Every structure is written in structure tokens, then in C-alpha cells.
Image (cartoon, rainbow, N blue to C red):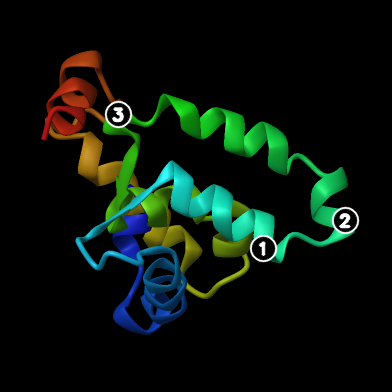
Amino acid sequence: ALSKTLTEDELIYLKEQFALLEPNKNGTISLENIQAAFTVNATDAMKESRIADFLASLNALQYRRMGFDEFCAATLSVHQLEALDHWEKRARCAFDMFEKDGNKAIVIDELASVCLI
């Protein structure tokens, strides 16, 4: 939900990175595309970090492909967003995507309706 609050200017870098990982230009990247990029570009610090855990977590990707929206959500850092202007407004917009009936709480039905879209 937070990734959907990004402006076009904020999406420029992510679009560039996604394009680098999308050799077939079909709107999705594969687990293999991501692994190949890490293999070619990984620094020693990256190899010693949690990159292996990250790559392992991607095995759960349905059909082993990721669209741009999923890529944005996966690469987004909440800590970076908190440092930007209008964090409170951005967080409220993300919350409002789930909370539909005005009771100031997200109930299971609301969460399910958004996740099934």
C-alpha cells in the first residue's frame, strides 16, 4: 500500500532498476533475472549480508515472476519513506486503502478484499 503512494518523480529510479532487470521487456522480471543481476553486481559486503536470505525468500513468488508493482513493494524501505516530507499523509493514504468502513480499524474482510484485487 505504501508503494502505491509514491509519486512519478519518486518512481523514476525504481523504473530504471526494473528495466535493467527486465531483459525480455514483457512487464515482469523473473527470479532468474534477479539472481543473475546479484551474481554479476554483488560486492563482498553484499555477499556477506542477507542477500542470500532475500533470494531464498523470492522462491515463493507465484509463477516465479514479479511485476513492477510487486517490485516497488519489495524494494521499498519504510525507514526511507519515514524520512521524506509528508510521511504522515503517505501513511494515512496507505492505511485508507485498507480501512473501508470508517471505524478506524482494518478488519479481516477489508484486508482480504484489497489482497484479492
Residue 77 shows in this picture: no
Q: Give the mark nearest the N terminus, 2 or 1.
A: 1
Classed neighbour count for the residue bearing mark 3: other residues with Cα under 10 Å, few (<14), some (14–19), many (≥20): few
Amino acid at circle 1:
Val
The residue at the point 52 percent across, 75 percent down is: 85
Whole-percent x and y of residue 23?
35, 67
Q: Counting other residues with Cα less than 10 Å from the Cα at mark 1, is it few (<14), some (14-19), or many (20 or more)? A: few
Question: Mark 3 — residue?
Answer: 62
The residue indicated by pointer 2 is 45
Which tag, 2 or 3, sits closer to the chain's start?
2
Q: Which residue is mark 1?
A: 40
Disc 2 vs disc 1: which is toward the camera? 1
Could you classify mark 2 by the number of other residues whose Cα lies within 10 Å: few (under 14), some (14-19), or many (20 or more)?
A: few
Point out the tag, 3 or 1, that comes first from the N-terminus.
Answer: 1
Where's residue 33, x and y in %? 46, 53
Q: Nearer the viewer, residue 4 or 24?
A: 24
Q: Secondary structure at mark 2?
A: helix
Position of 85 with respect to 111 (left or right) is right
Q: Which amino acid, by three-letter code, is at mark 3?
A: Gln
Three-letter code, disc 2 = Ala
Mark 3 to mark 1: distance in Å?
A: 25 Å
Identify whether 3 is placed above or below 100: below
Q: Secondary structure at mark 3?
A: helix
